Amino acid sequence: MTDEIKRIDEKPKKGRTVLSDTAATTAAPTAAPEKPDTKAGADNRTKPGSKNGTTGKAKPVSKAKPRGGSGGGAKTEKTEKTEKTAKSAKAAETAKSEKVANAANPKMQEMRKTVLRLAGTLFVITSAVALMLGGVNALTEKRIEQNAEERRIAAMAEVLPGYEAAGESWSDGVSTVTQMTLPEDGSVAWCVSLVSAGFGGDIEMSVAVEQVEGVLVVKKVAIVSHAETMGDPTSEEFLGQYAGHPAGITLGSGENSIDAMTGATVSSEAITLGVNTALEAVQEALALGAFGDNGGSEVQG
Amino acid sequence: MLIRLLQISLGAILVENFILVKFMGICPFLGVSKKMDTAFGMSMAVIFVMTLASIFTWMVDVWLLRPLELEYMQTVAFILVIAALVQLVEMFLQKSVPSLYSALGIYLPLITTNCAVLGVALLNAEASYTFIEATVSGFMGGVGFTLALLLFASVRERLQFADYPKCFEGFPIALVSAALLALAFMGFSGLEVF
Amino acid sequence: MVTQKEKTVEKKRGGWLRTTAGQFADGIWRQNPTLVLLLGMCPTLATTTTVQNALGMGLSVTAVLTCSNLVISLLRKLIPNQIRIASYIVIVAGFVTAVDLLLAAFVPALSASLGIFIPLIVVNCIILARAESFASKNPPLRSAIDGVAMGLGFTCSLTAMSVIREVLGSGTFLGYDVSFGVFEPMAIFIMPVGGFLTLGFLIAAMQKIMSRGSKKKEAE
């Protein structure tokens, strides 16, 4: 009882008092019996005894933790997370020990100082690392973008040599379609780049599509990268088969079919799936009018 | 949508199993698989952490890193999220299931350095999954991990009765057994039920 | 651990070079991180399908290991004990991302083929283990040397594995055909199966050699 009275006389500690309401609801069970006493007699602001204050501070902050941040750098959130776990662990400990002993303030202050020191150090380290990375990123950003651009152009040039890109690429998340024109005679074709799941990993491919007599057909297929182990997916013998086929290519026998690579059925199916997807993507892009009015409105798949 | 989720699940469990195909999570795979019950406890913890890690790293990535164009901070941010998460799981287990906590011992904090957990977070970010897709991917990745781990543990338990050269004791014979498991899982490649 | 007294004794015996040599011998052979300490299995299995990948990965890990060992050793008296693991992780993650960005900018082909395993260097057990057991207790120069030595050991074991896997599995070495039409490459070696098998046999061979060495010592 004397403790409460003592605390009423003290100046309210900054930072802890604001959360006194939440402290009342979220304080550790040991603090509960004190609630009615303090509320009855004291000013709400001075109510939080040290342990309420600590748990009060830790709890609402820890609620915010899983939500990530609302602005502020990633580093602040991350350091606060570790800080919070340390804090709430320490706070729980402190609450229990202070129920027995009564020397609340100096021990608690020391605890707070340690926690702040820990959190501060981690924050400083994380900020230093983030700064260093920001610098490296600034150095390498352009180069990385250039590399990606060069790869794209090289992939397009392989299937449509001599063509130039006309306008922005369209993407549906899986395939990226770029309309290209041949400067000499203005003929139009589309280059589609996509990734198909093969036997040993991803197969990155470029498919050139053109319109022949109102129907979208394959012009050429090129494999940019693959990790297949059987057969040679890049062989002209296999890939050359696709030229001239419209959408809905199958393997084996049938009207719109080609031969699979012997011993590499999975790879062949993966590439065929990629080519079919490419053809469908171009059709969808045109149907959506992605390339203006150039390129045909009377296109059948 | 459901088809896509089923595709992700099948991929994560069988076709692109994290341990036997992607080679992520080998350390706990070899370290905790000597006995079935520790293996089981570990895999439950891993499923839990992998799912939660997928959720929180998705949030950090989509709500924080991408809008601020800080994608290059992905590795740092993700690993901090995972470290904090594992710390929480540890505290939670210590209070609620102390028997499991003591059984797992050192292996619990080691989940932080489990390639599979950081791996699934990075893969989700790379594939730009939606929230549900990312969560399913994380959960199913954990299930695949469990499948491989439990299969392997049951094999390893019997290994002690096997007769093999002395120099193969410990990791080598375990790796050879894992090779046979990987061989079996190769049969799933190209599997496309959905 | 090297104490002040030992250092002066070292200097007198001209032993600094010997200790350094000892560190390298440890890193490459006696305490080879992959084959003896059995750490860092994931990248060992995943990036050894070609010698080029293995070398790239090994050198990246060496770079990260050396830098992080150096920085952690420099800061070892300043980092409070309770947050040391978290701090180490942040520092390592920083260097890994830096290496990742530099590779993507200047060696994009290697970056593409190593893929996700570059960021996964963060959770490579070797780096955290060395930070915890060596760099946090030793002066900066020694720690940096330890980083180089362990990294080299890792690179050596990766290279050994990848030579076996690439030559037998694709019949090439660094991309150049070495099968000379004599033998048909066995694709199984570049698949996960082959990875497990090769690593298992390599560790077994290492254990055999080590045990023979200790048997000799016992006999003496």
Image (spheres, coloured by chain):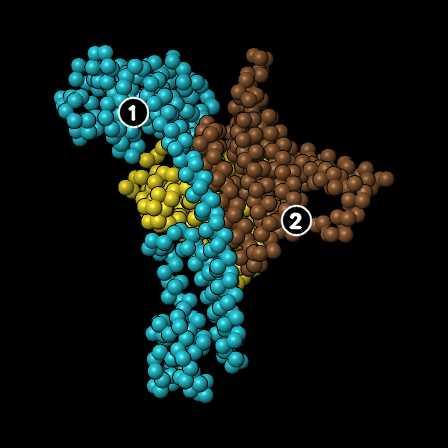
Q: Which three-letter amino acid code belongs to the residue tagged 1? A: Val
User: What is the crowding at mark 1: few (fewer than 14 residues within 10 Å), some, or many (at least 20)?
Assistant: many
Rendered yellow, the chain in question is B
Q: Position of residue B167 (x, y in %)?
A: 70, 37
Q: Position of residue A129 (x, y in %)?
A: 48, 47
Rendered brown, the chain in question is C
Using the rendered image of the protein, determine whether residue A178 is visible from the camera's viewpoint.
Answer: yes
Q: Position of residue A182 (x, y in %)?
A: 24, 15
Q: Nearer the viewer, mark 1 or mark 2?
A: 2
Residue position marked by numbered label 2 in the rendering: C139
Q: Residue at x 47, y 55 (%)?
A: A123
Residue position marked by numbered label 1 in the rendering: A192
**Along the line of sight, which residue is nearer the eye, C136 or B133?**
C136
Mark 1 chain: A
User: What is the crowding at mark 2: few (fewer than 14 residues within 10 Å), some, or many (at least 20)?
Assistant: some
Q: Residue at x 40, y 63 (%)?
A: A62
The local secondary structure at tag 1 comes to strand
